[in-house]
Image: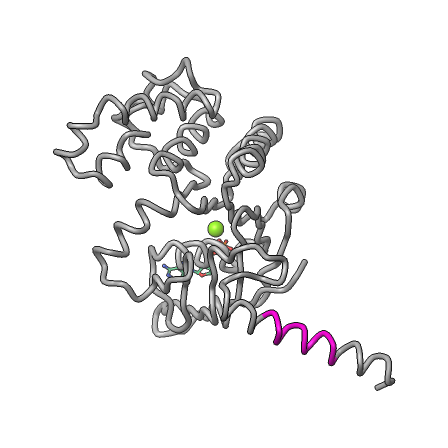
Amino acid sequence: MSEAVRSTRSAAASSHVEAAASYRQTGRTASGRRIQLEARGLKKSYFKAGHEIPVLRGVNLTVQQGEFLAVIGQSGSGKSTLLHLLATLDGADAGEVWLDGMRIDNLPRRRRDALRNRKLGMIFQFYHLLPELTALENVLAPLMIAHGLWSWLRHRRSHVQNARRLLEQVGLGQRWQHLPRELSGGEMQRTAIARALAPGPAVLLADEPTGNLDQHTGAEIMQLLRSLNRQHGLTIVMVTHDLANAQQAHRVVRLVEGRIESA
Ligand SMILES: Nc1ncnc2c1ncn2[C@@H]1O[C@H](COP(=O)(O)OP(=O)(O)O)[C@@H](O)[C@H]1O
Ligand SMILES: [Mg+2]
């Protein structure tokens, strides 16, 4: 190894160590931004008919406050699995998930559920709206769960106002009384985005949010996500197999053989 390479490598290694030490002391990265969401050494296997299917083999990922991060990977590479672990919807075999400086994957279930409802918004490829509820009622549902029935009833007017404002913000001001089946795919995803934003989450986790939409509608949804990130500082982690969409994020990483590589 040449001296130049050796000194560059050791400088890189020491700056990494310094960055890690600085984060441990301050919770901030070298750029001064706060770390909002972090995966440390996440491992996850599924077992099927007695066979182990290793999916995540030690995922380390750091997401800064206000960042729009895209995770790309082929179908079956474990993107949804990773997002579910970040959202604490599923448990890892090993590793930790940290949100705003607190480890969240090992919290008691009720606290974890409450924290997820309040701080982690999720959107999915197939929207997952409740079919019997209008767009407005879908957006109100997480607020009802987060506040409990009595508190929700007491503050119903302000919750409804807030939900109407969110639907307007995502471009659905005129559609709030529609049922999901009376909405287009893009409108359903907009409703799902408004629902995810209703409790005022710290992070939006998006699983292939344009995967079921035509190119034009998908581009509109990407534009909406970008503007939520830019104008409201919303931290977004989006997993996708679509490189063109991923490139609209601030940073793209790739999930390959169960680990994160920079793309
Ligand atoms: N509940 C499950 N049981 C068994 N295998 C699963 C389960 N969920 C996902 N897998 C497998 O884990 C791998 C990763 O799945 P997934 O995270 O959905 O990938 P991606 O979202 O990147 O397409 C795939 O091989 C999939 O078949
Ligand atoms: Mg998936």
Residue 86 percent location from the top left of the image: 42, 57
Characterize the magenta stretch by its predominant secondary structure.
Answer: helix
Q: Is residue 138 above or below residue 41?
A: above
Rendered image quadrant of residue 168: top left
Q: Is residue 56 above or below residue 152?
A: below
Q: Residue at x 47, y 25 (%)?
A: 170
Instruction: State the count of labels.
Output: 0
Range of magenta residues:
10-19
Q: Is residue 100 left or right of residue 239?
A: left
Judging depth in this view, the residue of 251 and 18 nearest the camera is 18
The quadrant of the picture occupied by the N terminus is: bottom right
Q: Is residue 13 above or below residue 250?
A: below
Judging depth in this view, the residue of 133 and 202 nearest the camera is 202
The quadrant of the picture occupied by the C terminus is: bottom right
Residue 259 percent location from the top left of the image: 56, 67
Rendered image quadrant of residue 146: top left
Q: Residue at x 61, y 58 (%)?
A: 254
The colour scheme used here is one colour
Q: Residue at x 42, y 16 (%)?
A: 173
For this orientation, the residue located farthest to the front is 26
Judging depth in this view, the residue of 255 and 30 nearest the camera is 30
Confirm whether the magenta stretch covers residue 15.
Answer: yes
Residue 201 percent location from the top left of the image: 39, 43
For this orientation, the residue located farthest to the top is 174
Residue 128 percent location from the top left of the image: 36, 37
Confirm whether the magenta stretch covers residue 139.
Answer: no
For this orientation, the residue located farthest to the left is 150
Q: Residue at x 53, y 62 (%)?
A: 61
Judging depth in this view, the residue of 262 and 161 nearest the camera is 161
Q: Is residue 83 above or below residue 158?
A: below
Which corner quadrant of the figure contains ligand 1?
bottom left
